[in-house]
Image (spheres, rainbow, N blue to C red):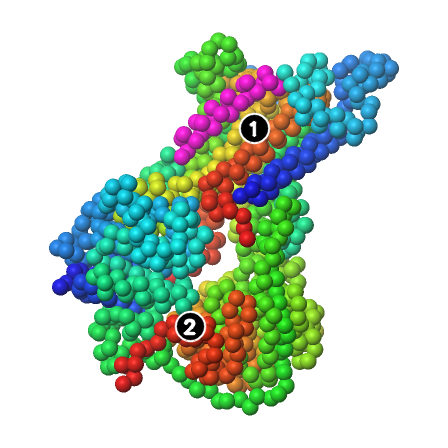
Amino acid sequence: MTLLSVKDLSVSIHEQPIIKNISFNLGAGEILALTGESGSGKSISALALMGLLPHGSKKEGIINFEGTDLNKISEPNFCKLRGKKISMVFQEPMTALNPVQSIGKQISETLVQHKACAPNELKNRVRKTMDRVGLRDIDPSRFPHQLSGGQRQRVVIAMAICLEPSILIADEPTTALDVTTQSKILKLIQEFAEKDGISIILITHDLAIVANISNYLLLMKEGILVDQGQPKRVFRDLSHPYTKKLFSASSEQFSFKENNLSKEKLLEVRSVSVNYGSHERGIFSKGKSVEAVSNVSLDIRKGERLGLVGESGCGKSTLTRTILGLQSASSGYIKFDGKEVSKYDNNFKKNIQVVFQDPYGSFNPRQKIGRLITEPFFTLGREAPSETEQRIIAKKMLKEVGLSSESIEKYIHEFSGGQRQRIAIARALVIQPKLIIFDEAVSALDVSIRSQILKLISDLTERYGLSYLFISHDLTVIENITENCLVMKNGKIVERGQTKHILRDPKNEYTLSLINAAPKFPNFLHA
Amino acid sequence: MINYFFRRLFTFVLSLALASIVIFSLVEIAPGDPASFMLGINAQADTIAALRAELGLDQPKLSRYLAWISGMLTGDFGISYTYRTNVTEMVGDRLWVSLPLAIYALFLSTVIAIPTGVYAAAKRGKTGDFTVISATQIGIAIPNFWFAIILVGIFAIKLQWFSAGGFSGWQNGMLNGITSLTLPALALALPQAAILSRIMRSALIETLGEDYIRTARAKGLSSWQTIWGHALRNALIPVLTIIGLQFSFLLAGAIIIEQVFYLPGLGRLVFQAITQRDLIVVESVVMLLVFAVILVNFIVDIAYMLVDPRLRQDSI
Amino acid sequence: MIKPNTSLQFGILFCLAPLAMATISFFWQPFDITELNISNRLKSVSLTHPFGTDHFGRDMLTMIMVGARTSIAVAFVAVGIGVLIGVPLGLFAATCRGSIIDDGVMRFNDLVFAFPSLVIAILITAIAGPSAFNAIIAIGIFNIPVFARISRGAALSLWQRDFILSAQVAGKTGFRISIEHILPNLMHILIVQATIQFSLGILAEAGLSYIGLGAQPPTPSWGRMLADAQTMVSLSPRLAIVPGIAIIFTVLGLNLLGDGLRDALDPRLRGSIKK
């Protein structure tokens, strides 16, 4: 039975077409996956269905829901549907809740708005809904900032399902969450479809999730529906070239040459602990300190490619900052090339570089690329080559990372996210360091671009004989690009060894849960 | 929460202490000896010395400062050099003009600004918004004393609805007092209302862009319900700060307006006291005004805590 | 809805008018305003006197032109004081964020903010005697915490950005990073704030002159013109209206300029306009 039928839906914002003529049907109890890379228009489609498009947008076409066209319905009547018949869960649980209202009040608001129950029953209903979404131990009088990301997402889900809507639209509901939380939330959403018969429109960029839980998928690219069908069929046939490209990028395994690791240690981190003093230190409160990194030891040998896996808050960023000398360790020491690293150690600074996660925040927007890339030469002091030579090296490096040498005269906002990460890599390579730290360097990129950047990293480091520490929350990335890896949890290293061994046969329970939670393509595809 | 409160309280006391030192020093370096000023040019040196001793001006600076502070703390502001009357009483009298004027103006400004700001934000990008923005743009540019002169010209001289100046006092009835404060309050309130309205508008627009607003809309709330139920409370936080600042501005910054309307308020008292070298009055009134500013800021900080649950718990 | 460019264009236009008047007045003035000509008093608007004459028979247009000099000079120097002292202070505080120095700078800011500006301006002019110079100092002092606070706040958020981290990895000092990376990125905020403070400076100067604590006679000033006009309001409202309009016009122009610049200089908006 068709519940919702969309015909020729087009959306333009400020006269710019965002979605072009998409049509699809949604059956009762079905999980429809809407997928595509960033900018494909999948989120805007969801907002169009909810009638919540931003100011200055125009939509055309027919959205038929239970016999009414949602494109023609009046705003007051649409309000009666939202939250009751069609509801939505958003990507960012950290900001999706009103910070100044208790979660109980926010959940009950849906009930009150649609006059779903008598005031004296309200408390009961809220409790029941919270139990339903797995918030059994949470008091409704708590405020959003007192909950974890996963719990907040459950609150948002509770608000969306408390009236048992016909359709639940989930817009990247797990993208902002850790992988272990992600699998729990996805399971919960799946249950709504199976047990309660709620139809789900799941928007996600992750093809493995699509393959695992959806009944039908729609693949979008630049506002156009390029491929659709049952995931089993779509991923087996790979009839559309774009589908094929995305699929191979997300399931890619590239092998790299095994290096002959020398015994020589390049970086030696020994029993390092870092205490963060409480931020709000005052006369009336003694700063309570938090141990962000606790007794961590690691070695990077010459030519070694080491991975560091951990979820958010595990202390990996603090560890990076400590290695870079931007944060002082409270105990332990760090040696580089056999010498203990001090703040003024030039040999160390000359030989270490870093590539950050955020392609937008990593560059000064007011300087040209030429100046941005040559900044590391500053560490060389008097040994630095002349400015003309620096520019020649910069141009060469830009070519190495696959950009034209004319880019040197441009500003950073003229480049896309993937290109920016290329520039970041060029910047890290100009002074030919011995060690590079990649801090979640591909996490913000779309899957097809991610695989290109990974390939680039793997090629270049091989050519320049570099060692690196690759920090990521994503096991598949680590698998592809490192030979050894460490697993970190709550500031401690819980497992270490060869990447292959760890992924195949983890000894630690936490590592196992990480591996199990990571979305993987189901077996039917490989058959 | 207790921690936050005590931290604010500490800042509050520290600011007051620093402010008192600054005021005292500023007045100390002001040229002109009050005693010789009081006695006129032809006074004998020994008469001046006698008066200085009587006023306590011959004491060392530190003990004069301490005496001043302890006097302030017990509500004794000293004796005016010029008028030879109790400063506490003088200030008390003037406060009965300045305080109602400030409250009246603040009331007008808030009543005008909040609805127009909310309206403009709700209609952002449309004609209604444009009208409000243009009006506030002009409102900010108008000097309040000029507006006061124009108001006098129209309502007092031409139409004769109000008196052109002076204050009849509260003894002739509440309504009488309010009437004579209406034009000054209006003149003070207009530019303030323009500023406040713009801040209300931009705070609300910013809040309306937050994710939780979309969440509320997804629950089925209409756009006005969302503004009322979710956006306004969050947007009021910056507005509250400005209202707090405006109150202190209105209390002290009314000097010029008091001048236009010949109102016997605090501002005029300081102005006259400075020109007459009545340092004890200057010190006391300025300290009182600074106290008001710091107190209002303190109250706003505490109000934050009540509005925002994130501040209610101590950080880990 | 007003387009950002429209604000900017009107702002520039409005600001150029008083600036041009002030500049021209250095070379040429329509009438000599140092001479009083009582027989010519309170002449209404005419071709020879576009704004009429005042109660001493002086040409109002010339008065406004020369008055513009005072207003602009006072406000400009006062903003300069705020920028030159406040910005380095704010940048310095942000560089040693969390330290006692940072705390000290912020306390100082709070302290200055706690003083009713007008009262202190009166106090200062009373201590040092009323003059345009002292008005500049009095207005300028209150610009310092404004610029210190705004540059500290913006710098703090910039210090969190990754590109600052990579500059640190390159071994650059806090001072160097502040000059090379922080300052250029908060320039647009400072320019906008400077136009706002400029307009507030014009208003403050007018206020101080109005109560006789700004520019002293015979230097004409818009605020003084208003003070003189007040007693004549029933006789000739024009005397109050003309300088008032001059002030409103200039302040409005500066505010429009500020709004326009905010949109034109915002790098985020600039990116989207290009698309």
In the image, A25: left or right of A52?
left
Q: Quadrant of residue A152?
A: bottom left
Is C181 in front, or is A229?
A229
Residue at the (59%, 51%) spot, across then down = A280
Q: Chain of mark 2?
A: A
Q: Position of residue C77 (x, y in %)?
A: 63, 41
Q: Which residues are magenta?
A: B90-114
For disc 2, the marked residue is: A513
B197 relative to A171, above or below? above
Q: Position of residue B282 (x, y in %)?
A: 67, 24
Q: How many marks?
A: 2
Does mark 1 fall on the same chain as mark 2? no
> Mark 2, residues whose alpha carbon is within 10 Å: few (<14), some, or many (≥20)?
few
A142 relative to A16, above or below? above
For the residues carrying marks 2 and 1, which lies nearer the camera in this image?
2
Is A309 in front, or is B39?
A309
Q: Position of residue C45 (x, y in %)?
A: 46, 24
Q: Position of residue A238 (x, y in %)?
A: 26, 80
For disc 1, the marked residue is: B253
Is A240 in front, or is A364?
A240
Say which element carries label 2: helix
Type of residue at label 2? Answer: Ser
Is B94 a magenta residue? yes
> Mark 1, residues whose alpha carbon is within 10 Å: few (<14), some, or many (≥20)?
many
If the image is split into quadrants, where does the C terminus of chain C sit? bottom left
**Label placed on residue B140:** none
In the image, A164: left or right of B295?
left
